[in-house]
Image (cartoon, rainbow, N blue to C red):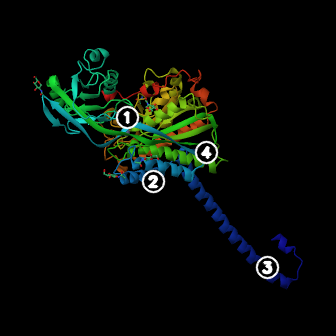
Amino acid sequence: MNQISDINIPQRVVTSKWIYIIFGILTLFTITTIVLSAVILGVVVNRLDSKNETSLNNNGPISFADQIKIDELMKHLQQLQIIADRSNGTRVIATAGFNDTLDYIVSQLEQNTNLIVKRQYFTVRNFIIQGTPRLQTRINGNIVDRVYITEFTHILFSQRADFDSHVRVVVIPNQGCNDADWSSVSAADSVALVIRGVCTDPAKSALAEKYRVKGLLIYNNGATLANYPPVQGVRNNLNTTIPVFSISYTLGMQLVNGSADAGVMMNIDVSDANGIGNICADTPTGDKTKTIVVGSHSDGVAAGSGINDNGSGTIGNLILALNLARLFQTSSASYSTYPYRVRFCWWGAEEHGLLGARYHVEQALLPSTIEIGERFQDYLLNLNYDMLAGPNYRFGIHDDKTVLPTTPTQALYGTGQITNIFRQWFNEQNLPWSNSSLGGGSDYIPFLAAGLAVGGVNTGAGGSKPASERDQYAAVLGIGNGGIANAAYDPCYHQQCDRITNINPFAYEKVVKAAAYAIEYFGRLNDLEKWLYPQGRMKNYENFNRDRIYDFGNDPDLI
Ligand SMILES: *[C@@H]1O[C@H](CO)[C@@H](O)[C@H](O)[C@H]1NC(C)=O
Ligand SMILES: *[C@@H]1O[C@H](CO)[C@@H](O)[C@H](O)[C@H]1NC(C)=O
Ligand SMILES: *[C@@H]1O[C@H](CO)[C@@H](O)[C@H](O)[C@H]1NC(C)=O
Ligand SMILES: *[C@@H]1O[C@H](CO)[C@@H](O)[C@H](O)[C@H]1NC(C)=O
Ligand SMILES: *[C@@H]1O[C@H](CO)[C@@H](O)[C@H](O)[C@H]1NC(C)=O
Ligand SMILES: CC(=O)N[C@H]1CO[C@H](CO)[C@@H](O)[C@@H]1O
Ligand SMILES: [Zn+2]
């Protein structure tokens, strides 16, 4: 008011001016009030928003784990289901389902990231069986064509056979597990007949090759009713040079009984599967000689779509790659790149003996591999993600205490460090966890064999959840959320029902978040190499026996 009274103007005019001024002040006041209210309201709304956000974000800066969203995982997983459905319900190697899976991964990476994508092809010898294999027996002059699957099966990777007449059968004494068994009879140029057991089929097969047989029949042992039929789904050594069939106990006994005058004709057409692919995608940043390798497998089994096994790992790894690339590219101001290169890989033919990962490690170890970043010595660790979403899941953290006794000692300390980081994350998230073995069965094996620190998480395969584990999980997650005791972690393991419905989204999102956390944790360490290998790591591979890559951690269940 003082200011206005100071204005030296005539009274009449002043009166009318006052009306305008009061009106103006009122208007100003109203506007100010509205604006202020809006601002205050806005602040409150923002506060509420940011409260939501911070509670999701753990109050921290941008984190890799926060980028992982179940919707994105499920969207891509759905695509694998479509790919499997188009390919007679399978994504096994040497099918369109497998090739389409690789193409899908590559196109997603190429369209959405600046990662450097490479394909690596290899051959699986004697993999494809054409037509129906034949086994004809002649026992005491009696000729019978045997029924494929019910009386005999082919052991995978064994050689083709093209007999045009019956070949004499020689029974190998004992179980055919050592030289003495084979040298006591002359089996050369004959078909050897040996009982299943004590040592593996591949071990018997290797001896049969050594004693120059024309073919090998391994008959089931009839110990129980389940041990009568021929054994399905058995693998031989890679590149086996003789034909090998598994036959029923009954047929085996008929041949043993009639062995004084028994002959067989084996006919099977097998061919190589060429162009089986591994895919790797590298960050363009980070030290290539200090690479973090993050792997999962890309193939499924013949029996089903392979959506949990290991489509969940395949897509989990894809989501990790897509999101890390995006963080590195779009928010470089707030999310700095790591000093180490990250290489995401999808291994082919895991289901047939970790073949893609083994091939990759073997190639990286060759003395002729001299390109920087491609040598095995350029790798610092391997994280493996397979089967991440079992319906009756557990959070199985690979436990460093469970490595095979023949593991190179250099790998042990770092493997323990990795185990601890995962345990720490699950503890911080108030999630239960379990120990998972590092004794074999997945793609980390060849890396471990060559002395690299490894780790990862999976939600369990065909094994059964004990009641104690169910109770342990229910204690943390709430009554009823511990899953089903004495049921498989994945009841559809290696079966047709391993479809998109065979996924637990809660477990899936958590495991992929754990994976993101681990990558970020390792990626941000100042001296990852020293952190993993305080005593130094294996660097000189000149005298390393590369057969170890194939021998180490082989499935014991081939017996
Ligand atoms: C599905 O199986 C049929 C019969 O075995 C075969 O002819 C066809 O090529 C297969 N399709 C694909 C996409 O593999
Ligand atoms: C899959 O792709 C490889 C490599 O291109 C090719 O050699 C092979 O024939 C393809 N297999 C099928 C079943 O399409
Ligand atoms: C199988 O044979 C191929 C070439 O014929 C060879 O490159 C590969 O190393 C062999 N694999 C094994 C395990 O012997
Ligand atoms: C084999 O011979 C034994 C004893 O001679 C006999 O008990 C058995 O039934 C025979 N088995 C077959 C499958 O012929
Ligand atoms: C995991 O194994 C370690 C030993 O390696 C043991 O101390 C720990 O209690 C186990 N944890 C669970 C949850 O089983
Ligand atoms: C970690 C894990 O369970 N991985 C599985 C992926 O698929 C292979 C082949 O079936 C299994 O052996 C692995 O156990
Ligand atoms: Zn599997």
Q: Label 1 to label 3, Cα distance in Å?
A: 79 Å
Is 453 left or right of 199, judged from the image as shown? Answer: right
Residue that label 3 marks: 18
Disc 2 from disc 4: Cα separation: 27 Å
Across and down, in percent, residue 304 comes to 33, 46
Tell me how many marks there are: 4
- The image quarter in which residue 273 lies: top left
Is 93 rendered above or below residue 165? Answer: below
Q: Tell us which disc is closer to us: 4 or 1.
A: 4
- Residue 523 appears at what percent x and percent y? 59, 37
Task: For marks 2 and 4, give the one nearer the viewer.
Answer: 2
Determine the CA span between mark 2 and mark 3.
68 Å
Instruction: Determine the secondary structure under disc 2.
Output: helix
Queried on whether the Cβ of the residue with tag 3 lies below 8 angstroms from ligand 5, the answer reads: no
- Comparing labels 2 and 3, the label whose residue is closer to the camera: 2
Within 10 Å of disc 4 (Cα), the crowding (few <14, some 14-19, many 20+) is few
